[in-house]
Image (cartoon, rainbow, N blue to C red):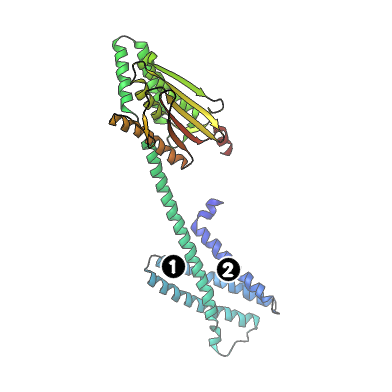
Amino acid sequence: MYKFFEDRSRQFWLLHTLGWLGFAIVNYLGSLVQETRDAYLIVIGLDAYIGWLITIPLRYAFQRVWFWPPWKMVITVLLLAFVIAAIWTAVRNFNYWEIYRHGSRPGDWVKYIRDTPVAFYVILSWCGLYFGIKYYQTLQLEKQKSLTATNKAHEAQLKMLRYQLNPHFLFNTLNAISTLVLINESDTANKMLSRLSDFLRYSLYKDPINKVALEQELYAARLYLEIEKVRFTERLTIVFDIEPGTEQARVPSLILQPLIENAIKYAVASQINGGQITITAKKFGHDLLLEVADNGPGMTITNGLPKTSNTSATAESGVGLVNTKERLAALYDNDFALVLTHNQPTGLKVNIRIPLQLEKTEREHA
């Protein structure tokens, strides 16, 4: 039904017909006030039909003048409306004298067009409705084009943000695999390479526009952390605290990745004894709370971003957080939160709050 009415040509014929049908009904109701014969109903029907027929050429004429200068278009519309009104008036009066008056014609031919001002008002109303509807349709079409362009730009931005993989991670991983091969740890190198392949496949083939189940996101996080576990061995401790029932919550793909990368770099790699990373997911009312916490040396938080003595480190960690915040803003508008706090006794916590959208609920509404 929507596609049927979406066609602008169908819209015109439907509204055009309904408009003249309404004109006939109004005239019929007005005739009930006076004592009229049944023949007058025929006259009303003919008047509406002639009006329906004679205004059709106006549509094609107005399509040609639509892009003219305003003053020229207004003058043309008024002239055409007056000519159509005069012709319609003459035909209406002819029907009236021939059918209702049984051929009792007036002696003065001017009486055939004396009601032109009234008819001009009706035709001018038709023109006003036509231009009003056409302007509205054009405005809606422009809005649709603008929304389409915005959505395309929005999708491109999300993809750009999502595909900003850390090149240091790839370099370090490949370097670790190379080292394992040199020391004849081929089994470990093979496992590490397999995990890297699975992780890259996940990151490249998951559409950043669509959300994924949290369990898939945690699967990718485990792949990444298992790769890093080979590098750091006992220096890296990983803890998952996932509340039952949150596994099917919908989250942006790889939304935890930059947060885990920052924790690895500044809480584990920077310490001789390594560190612990805790990933938490739990429900809070109608929201889903995600947390990535570490027990590293921590950072000074300024304007929601970590601040260290190393300017480049601050910039790199800040880019990951800004990237994450921009993705969340693009997907959830203002219905999200990303907060950095100090972990106790040491370290940093990054908390994300997003609407709780369960995969089962989305399927039910599909």
Residue 236 position by quadrant: top left
| Disc 2 secondary structure class | helix
Q: Is residue 241 visible?
A: yes
Q: How many marks?
A: 2
Count residues near mark 1 (Cα–Cα under 10 Å), then give few for <14, some for 14-19, many for 20+: some
Foreground pick, 109 / 355 = 355
Foreground pick, 301 / 50 = 301
Query: Would you name the residue on which mark 2 appears?
Result: 20
Q: Amino acid at mark 2?
A: Trp
Q: Earlier in the sequence, mark 1 or mark 2?
A: 2
Foreground pick, 218 / 24 = 218
Q: The C terminus is located in which quarter?
A: top right
Res. 161 mark: none
Q: Amino acid at mark 1?
A: Phe
Q: Position of residue 165 (x, y in %)?
A: 35, 30
Q: Position of residue 112 (x, y in %)?
A: 55, 84
**Left or right of residue 175, residue 22 in this image:** right
Query: Would you name the residue on which mark 1 appears?
Result: 62
Is 53 drawn above or below residue 303 in the view shown? Answer: below
Is 188 drawn above or below residue 127 in the view shown? Answer: above
Q: Is residue 162 visible?
A: no
